[in-house]
Every structure is written in C-alpha cells, then in structure tokens.
Image: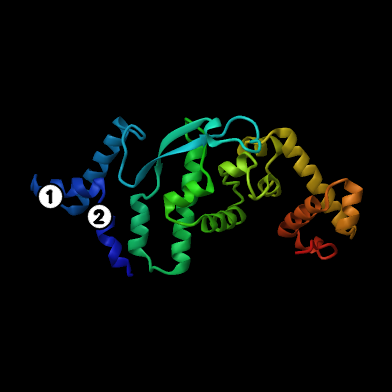
Amino acid sequence: MGTQAYVGTSKRTFQQAVLRLLETDYALLGSRRVLAMLAEDIQHVVDEFYPPPDRLSSGWMVFTGTKATGPKAYPGQSAAEHQLVTLAWPVLLPEDIQQLASQPETKPVRRQWFQKRLMRLIEYGWQHPDGPVLLTLADLAAMLGLSTIQVSQLLTEARQSTGKPLLTKGLYFDQGMRPTHKAEVIALYEQGVDEADIARQTGHAATSVGRYIRDYERVRLLLKRGISVDHMSRLTDMQPGVVRSYVKLTSQYHPDLTQCAMPPP
C-alpha cells in the first residue's frame, strides 16, 4: 500500500474542515496559505477555551489506566485494587497520519511510527496532571493494534536508544516477567543523573535506587579485576542470576570489562 492511501485520512482534521468551510460556505478566495493560517489560529482559540480532556478530538481514545501510587504489587492482587484513572489518550494524531502520507511504507518506517506513538502514550500518562497514569503491555497492544510481544520489543529498543525508563504498570509495580528496575536506574545513572533525580524520574524509592547503583558498581569493580560470576556471587552475597543481570548491564555501557566474565546464555 503506497503513501497515497493515507492522503485522504490525513485531510480529515479540524483545521482542514475549517479551511473547507472558509473556502466554500464563506467564499473566501484569498491565498490558501493565509486561509490555512486562519484555520490554525481558530484551532488555537478552541484549544485555549476548550482544552483536552474537556473535549475528545479525532484520534484520541478514552481508556482507563492505573495511577502510579501505592506499594509494590503482591501476588494475586487484582487490577481493581489499584487506583484507576480514565483519560483521553493521544492514540492517532494528525501528524501520525501525515507521516504515513509523506514517507514510503517500509518496515523500518512502520516500526519507527509505532514506536513513536508507543512512547507518546507512556509519556503522556506519566506527565498527566491526574497521574502519573500507567498502562500495561496489553493495554498498549490493544490501543495500537499490536501484539504484546511487539510492544515489548519496541519498548526494549526505545529504552536502549533513549535511556528513558518508559514505565509500564508491570514495570512500575514490579509485576510479571518485565525488564528489572535495575535497567532503568542504571541507564539514567550512566547518563550522569544523580540518585535523587533518578528516584524522581522513575518513581522508585531513593533507598532502592542507591542499592541498585551500589550493587552495579560492586560488580563493575569485580569485573575489572577479572573475577568470575560465581566468585562474585560469593563475594557480594548476591544470587548468581542477580550478578549476571548486573554483568549484562555492564556489557551495555562498558563492553571491554565483560570479556573476563560473560554471563552464560
């Protein structure tokens, strides 16, 4: 399917409707660029007096997420036991359609298109005045028309490329087989973010952030000395699996240190 297939969809916006109204019903025959600027100004006035979520724009979806508050989830805890928040979410914006209409429909372009929308949804919920509001992998998959595996892969790539934690409900509440909190904390730490800011950005307790960083530095120091994973486990009193997770993180940021003690597959 070529880019022309999306041109019609890209024109079904509020600004385009105002532009057609000015040209047809009001017979304003001036420069189309001037009329487009007028339509844009009308959009700004509407935004000013009727800001979201007081109205639901095209491409937005009403969906219920979970507020990022309360302790770590316990086994068997139901979703209803968390505080729920219903918001209008920016699922498919005009610029998303415009991107489809202006770029060739290749797999890399399509993947980047979904990833951008995925990141926008997560960051929108985290930054919302009624939040932070979290979505699950299944929520995101349903909203974007993807599988949970595809969403998980896109999130992993986005976290690695941007260094952002991009928290889902499972990651925030430490539920399920999700990437550990260590990964997001260490990613920010390696960017030079201090512990207090890491705790604020990730929503984790300052004590937990400090523990992750100290354990990471202990493993990194032992790697410099060529200590094996099993020996590290005995020296640090950490489980071998935990040590391997820190070794794997170290390999992302300091690959030269992991040649002496690579974790088994």
Give the residue furthest to the front.
76
Q: Quadrant of the N terminus?
A: bottom left
Neighbourhood count class around disc 2 (C-alpha, 10 Å): few under 14, some 14–19, many 20 upward: some
The residue nearer to you, when weighing 214 against 192, is 214
Q: Amino acid at mark 2?
A: Lys
Is residue 170 rendered to the left or right of residue 253?
left
The label shown at residue 11 is: 2
Tag on residue 3? none
Instruction: Pinpoint residue 182: horizontal percent, then vertical percent.
Output: 71, 46
Say which of marks 2 and 1 sits in front: 2
Q: Residue at x 90, y 57 (%)?
A: 225
Above or below residue 247? Residue 22 is: above
Question: Which structural element holds mark 2?
Answer: loop
- Residue located 64% across and 50% down the image: 177
Please identify the quadrant where the C terminus is shown: bottom right
Q: CA distance from mark 2 to mark 1?
A: 15 Å
Q: Nearer the viewer, residue 108 or 18?
A: 108
Q: Is residue 255 above or below residue 181?
A: below
Residue shown at 63% from the left, 35% from the top: 200
Residue 75 located left or right of residue 215 = left
Q: Which residue is mark 1?
A: 23
Give coordinates of residue 149: x percent, y percent: 54, 58
Q: Position of residue 70 (x, y in %)?
A: 61, 29
Question: Is residue 86 toward the left or the right of residue 207 in the image?
Answer: left
Residue in front for this viewpoint, 51 or 69: 69
Q: Residues within 10 Å of mark 1 (few under 14, many from 20)?
A: some
